[in-house]
Image (cartoon, helix red, strand yellow):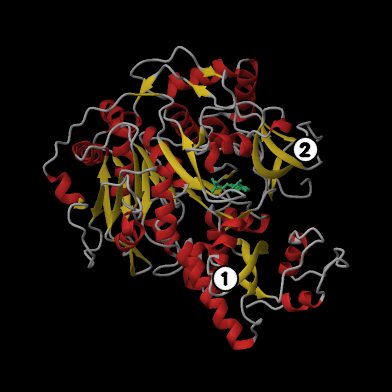
């Protein structure tokens, strides 16, 4: 790391940031170390408005089921909307919405509250109660954010499902959550095309296999043709038209579940990560304030989708809790051309921009092959801070982002965190941290991140190990919905001394102590910043029972998407080659897209007469990873029943 360039904070940043310089950071870390509970208690009182103040900060009597601020009462939507209006921000723009076609709609805090209250009243009238689960399957829209806020307002627990997931994935989530309602749209608009949403909901709910579900609420986004199930389907605009724009918030306990968000683990079906109300909102607000240094005049833009945790914390909750102005974007970075992001930064005078390395890498490629979309053609001088999330950012992409987007004077916050952590865990703070490209640097104050060995003992800096968090923190996952045992097993394995297991490997620099994330240590892949379990993709492949006998999935490095999915497949018919292999590979990709969603399509498909296995019958995944990378196989292959398959598997389709 010492050979990499370092970027210390400027004097202006140190003077003006919310956290002013290394000494201020050290003081916060020391305050948390001296009294973890007092530190978080102070911040919870300062950042959130409580209907009834809490008297107890942390209850660890049932660890690892930790409870934070448990006797306090609050409401997330009150904290994000009403209190800003009470503070005089009613006319301030909350959301600048830009649609796929470039049209813009600005919504003030008062207007957003009115929308949220009307929908909340409508949900109540349909019988949705505190604690009920509501699935949101929506395009990026003001309505999508409002739907989440409306659930929060009445104490319903939302579960947002990314609009790119298939009917099967949606059905699994509706069933697992026992949802009473799905809020969706007729269609979504992406890259100039209309894509179905309601039709996928119809398919997911076909055959009455979601018995808990009563209503489907439909936001009219495109006006496209859709089927209608009388008695179940309701138009959002009809439902809310006559509703009052006043709705008393439901005051809930701090531990009340605000949302479930399904994410991939190393085994089985995706798990419903359950988050709380108070602790979650505290960290959403606090990290937006300290990591992004959000100030009243900023225009904040997080390019994530509300279907991912980044969209939850840094679109639907954090910026609104602080009374900020944010951009919400419906489209894709390459439509109408790959200058879209830069053009939007210029148009809306975005000052804080938060995106994923995969987007940066693909836009670098685009800019290098087409002058017209090069960022130099746009006025990006409104920017003052850049952020990165979702996967490691390689130093070359970091440098390009810094020079070409940030003009060489915007700090980059490389934020490491997870669906389970609720908000940033390890990240630079602007005005504090000397940046080193490719490193997420140091823990957020109060987050006790550390690197240990398999038995939970600290490893010295310079030596890699397992990333853990030693003490609980307010926005941590509370449980896996419906499966507390899996929660314990996945995140608090007994050999790790009660530490939270992140599932990533990491190493600290010997000199600076900075963290670098080295990647997942389980069977989770990160493709374009999207998490996917290899087992999930394998089960999707083998569920194609007409064709597939056996399948194994591994990741391999990819210049643009970080990792690429590589599937090894044994068919129930003779191993294909040439055009036949290409056609079957396409068929299998389409199958996976239908089972999980297009993001899970394998990039490479390799066919073999069988798969390489150990004597005990275990698939030799390490060997497959070498094959996928195109590396020479160095593993012992003497136990292979059929050494010829190595050559067969060398060909990717
Ligand atoms: C927020 C989010 C979590 C996994 C995580 C890690 C990877 C996220 C990263 C990063 C290196 C960063 N990850 N941010 N790796 N540097 N700044 O992405 O949540 O979808 O749950 O993914 O993403 O592997 O464990 P989620």
**Which residue is drawn at the image coordinates 74% and 65% (left, top)?**
624
Locate the C terminus by quadrant.
Answer: bottom right
Q: Is residue 454 above or below residue 65?
A: below
The reply to whether residue 165 is in sight is: no
**Residue 230 falls in which quadrant of the image?**
bottom left
| Relative image position of residue 523 (x, y in whole percent) | 65, 53
Residue in the foreground of this view, choosing between 502 and 435: 502
State how far apart marks 1 and 2 are (Cα). Answer: 44 Å
**Residue 11 falls in which quadrant of the image?**
top right
| Relative image position of residue 423 (x, y in whole percent) | 52, 37
**Which tag, 1 or 2, sits closer to the chain's start?**
1
Q: Under tag 1, what secondary structure?
A: helix
Residue in the foreground of this view, choosing between 489 and 273: 489
**Which residue is drawn at the image coordinates 53% and 21% (left, top)?**
40
Q: Is 403 situated left or right of 467 in this image?
A: left
| Relative image position of residue 434 (x, y in whole percent) | 66, 39
Reading the image, the residue beneath label 2 is: 454
Total residue callouts: 2
Quick one: which residue is furthest to the left in this view? 242
Residue 368 badge: 1
Q: Is 247 situated left or right of 620 in this image?
A: left
| Relative image position of residue 65 (x, y in whole percent) | 55, 27
Q: Is residue 155 above or below residue 186?
A: above
Mark 1: C-beta under 8 Å from nearest atom of ligand 1: no
């Amino acid at each position: 790391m010492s050979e990499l360039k370092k970027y210390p904070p400027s004097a202006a940043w140190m003077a003006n940031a919310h956290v002013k310089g290394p000494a201020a950071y050290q003081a916060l870390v020391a305050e948390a170390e001296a009294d973890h509970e007092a530190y978080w208690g102070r911040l919870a009182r300062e950042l959130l408005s409580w209907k009834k103040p809490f008297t107890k900060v942390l209850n660890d009597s049932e660890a690892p089921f930790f409870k934070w601020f448990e006797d306090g009462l609050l409401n997330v939507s009150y904290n994000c909307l009403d209190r800003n209006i009470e503070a005089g921000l009613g006319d301030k723009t909350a959301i600048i919405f830009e649609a796929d076609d470039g049209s813009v709609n600005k919504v003030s805090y008062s207007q957003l509250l009115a929308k949220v209250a009307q929908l909340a009243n409508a949900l109540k009238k349909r019988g949705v109660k505190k604690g009920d689960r509501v699935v949101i399957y929506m395009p990026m829209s003001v309505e999508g954010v409002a739907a989440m806020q409306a659930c929060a307002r009445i104490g319903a627990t939302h579960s947002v499902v990314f609009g790119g997931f298939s009917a099967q994935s949606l059905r699994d989530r509706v069933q697992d959550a026992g949802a009473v309602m799905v809020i969706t749209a007729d269609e979504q608009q992406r890259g100039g095309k209309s894509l179905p949403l309601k039709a996928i909901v119809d398919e997911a709910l076909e055959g009455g296999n979601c018995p808990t579900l009563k209503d489907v609420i439909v936001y009219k986004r495109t006006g496209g043709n859709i089927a209608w199930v009388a008695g179940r389907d309701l138009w959002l605009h009809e439902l809310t038209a006559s509703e009052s724009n006043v709705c008393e918030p439901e005051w809930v306990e701090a531990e009340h579940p605000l949302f479930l968000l399904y994410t991939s683990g190393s085994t089985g079906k995706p798990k419903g990560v359950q988050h709380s109300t108070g602790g979650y909102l505290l960290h959403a607000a606090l990290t937006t304030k300290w990591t992004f240094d959000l100030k009243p005049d900023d225009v904040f833009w997080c390019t994530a989708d509300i279907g991912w945790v980044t969209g939850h914390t840094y679109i639907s909750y954090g910026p609104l809790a602080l009374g900020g102005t944010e951009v919400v974007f419906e489209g894709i970075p390459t439509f109408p051309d790959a200058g879209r992001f830069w053009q939007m930064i210029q148009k809306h005078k975005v000052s804080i921009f938060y995106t994923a390395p995969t987007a940066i890498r693909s836009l670098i490629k685009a800019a290098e092959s087409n002058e017209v979309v090069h960022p130099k053609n746009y006025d990006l001088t409104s920017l003052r801070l850049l952020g990165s999330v979702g996967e490691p950012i390689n130093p070359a992409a970091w440098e390009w982002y810094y020079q070409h987007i940030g003009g060489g004077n915007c700090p980059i916050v490389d934020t490491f965190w997870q669906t389970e952590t609720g908000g940033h865990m390890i990240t630079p703070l602007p005005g504090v941290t000397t940046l080193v490209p490719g490193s997420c640097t140091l823990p957020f104050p109060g987050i006790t991140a550390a690197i240990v060995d398999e038995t939970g003992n600290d490893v010295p800096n310079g030596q890699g190990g397992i990333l853990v968090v030693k003490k609980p923190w307010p926005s941590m996952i509370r449980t896996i919905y419906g499966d507390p045992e899996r929660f314990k097993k996945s995140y608090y394995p007994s050999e790790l001394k009660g530490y939270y297991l992140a599932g990533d490997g990491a190493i600290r620099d010997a000199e600076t102590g900075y963290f670098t994330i080295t990647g997942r240590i389980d069977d989770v892949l990160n493709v374009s910043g999207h998490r996917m379990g290899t087992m999930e993709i394998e089960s999707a492949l083998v569920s194609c029972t007409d064709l597939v006998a056996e399948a194994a999935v591994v990741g391999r490095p990819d210049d643009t998407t970080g990792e690429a999915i590589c599937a090894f497949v044994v068919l129930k018919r003779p191993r294909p080659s040439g055009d036949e292999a290409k056609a079957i590979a396409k068929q299998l990709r389409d199958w996976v897209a239908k089972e999980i969603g297009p993001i899970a399509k394998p990039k490479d498909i390799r066919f073999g007469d069988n798969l390489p296995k150990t004597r005990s019958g275990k698939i030799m995944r390490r060997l497959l990873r070498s094959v996928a990378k195109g590396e020479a196989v160095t593993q012992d292959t003497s136990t292979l029943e059929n050494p010829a398959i190595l050559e067969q598997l060398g060909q990717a389709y």
